[in-house]
Image (spheres, rainbow, N blue to C red):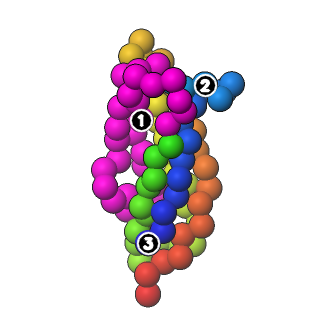
Amino acid sequence: SGVVTITISDLNGNPLPAGSTVELKTTNGELLLGNSFKIPNTASVVEYDVIVVPSEGDGAQGYLNAIVTTPFGHETVSSNSVTIIDAD
């Protein structure tokens, strides 16, 4: 398993609106400790640690997708490549 730290902000590096939801998905492996959370009422950018456990036979590359939905219903998807070392 490995830990990936993601930073949740808008394009200008500002915090998202309080109550925005973040849903995380991976194309390789499994996410531990939950895959969704709400942005708190804060003046700071939110960082979130994700534990990824590799799945046997899925290959070494995968994507970690973050789907962010604001309280106003605006949805944004961010996808980043991550290297996964599969379990043997």
Marks 2/3: CA distance?
A: 30 Å
- Farthest residue toward the left? 34
Marks 1/2: CA distance?
A: 16 Å
Amino acid under label 2? Asn
When asked about the image quadrant of residue 13, the answer is top right
- Farthest residue toward the right? 12
Is residue 67 among the parts visible in the rendering?
Answer: yes
Q: Would you name the residue on which mark 2 appears?
A: 14
The magenta-colored residue range is: 17-46
Is residue 69 among the parts visible in the rendering?
Answer: no
Q: Which of marks 2 and 3 is in front?
A: 2
Q: Residue at x 39, y 39 (%)?
A: 23
Q: Which of marks 1 and 2 is in front?
A: 2
User: In the rendered structure, are the residues bearing label 2 and label 3 in contact, judged by CB atoms less than 8 Å apart?
Assistant: no
- Farthest residue toward the bottom? 88
Q: Would you name the residue on which mark 3 appears?
A: 1
Residue 73 is situated, as x and y percent measured from the top left of the image, at: 41, 16
Marks 3/1: CA distance?
A: 22 Å
Mark 3 surroundings within 10 Å by alpha-carbon count, few (fewer than 14), some (14 through 19), many (20 or more): some
Mark on residue 22?
1
Q: Earlier in the sequence, mark 2 or mark 3?
A: 3
User: In the rendered structure, are the residues bearing label 3 and label 1 in contact, judged by CB atoms less than 8 Å apart?
Assistant: no
Q: Which of marks 1 and 2 is nearer the N terminus?
A: 2
Q: In this view, does 71 lie above or below 2?
A: above
Amino acid under label 1? Val
Mark 1 surroundings within 10 Å by alpha-carbon count, few (fewer than 14), some (14 through 19), many (20 or more): many
Q: Quadrant of the N terminus?
A: bottom left
Could you say whether the residue bearing mark 2 is in a helix, strand or loop? loop
Q: Residue at x 40, y 30 (%)?
A: 39
